[in-house]
Image (spheres, rainbow, N blue to C red):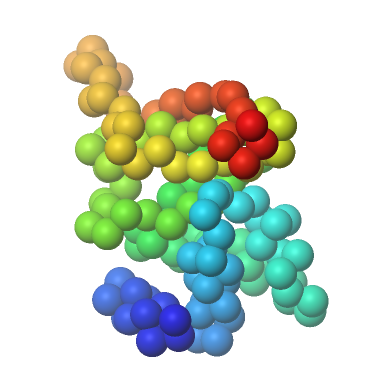
Amino acid sequence: MRDEIEKILIDKNIKPTAMRQLVLEVILKNNGALSLIEIEKQFEHVERTTIYRTLKTFQENCIIHSIHDGTGGVRYAICSEGCTCNIGDLHAHFLCTNCGQTICLKDYLIPDPKLPEDFDFENASFVIRGICPDCK
């Protein structure tokens, strides 16, 4: 897995430091989206700001995307290959109301909103709430 992680970072012109590799490994090993706190719990002696800066770097380079799932926090999930984090890449997310897990539904794309000319699109989110298969 280390080679795969290093390749992802190098392909995005990101220096593959040990910390970046470790954070990316945590995200890749998880099937759902993780909060900063959930990622932070994976490390004993790492400052939150270091993890946050790493996540911002990943987000700016379309390795991960952020999700505002309505719980008041932000979660992070891996982008699909070739993702540019533009409207064509935006997809729905599922929030399990039982366990709190947020899952990307990458096959359910959010349609391009046709906004009036004087509006500038920044982001959109679509969250479906219900019970996940693990909690059923």
Q: In the picture, residue 117 is in which quadrant?
A: top left
- Identify the image quadrant of the C terminus: top right
Report the number of discs: 0
Would residue 70 appear left or right of 66 to someone viewing this image? right
Q: Position of residue 122 (x, y in %)?
A: 36, 33
- Whether residue 33 is visible to the viewer of this picture, yes or no, is yes
Mark yes or no: residue 123 visible.
no
Residue 100 in the figure: left or right of residue 25:
right
Please tell me in which quadrant of the rendered image residue 124 appears.
top left
Q: Position of residue 10 (x, y in %)?
A: 32, 81
Q: Is residue 102 above or below residue 20?
A: above
Instruction: Give the side of residue 135 with respect to residue 58, left or right.
Output: right
Q: Give above or below for 17 relative to 136.
A: below
Residue at horizontal 30 percent and vertical 38 percent from the top: 107
Q: Quadrant of residue 42?
A: bottom right
The residue lying toward the viewer, choosing from 5 and 61, is 5
Compared across the picture, whether 106 is left or right of 66 comes to left
Nearest the eye: 61 or 89: 89
Q: Residue at x 71, y 64 (%)?
A: 40
| Residue 36 picture location, percent across and down | 66, 56
Residue furthest out toward the top:
116
- Which quarter of the rendering shows the N terminus? bottom left
| Residue at figure coordinates x 54%, y 50% from the top left | 32
Furthest-right residue in view? 44
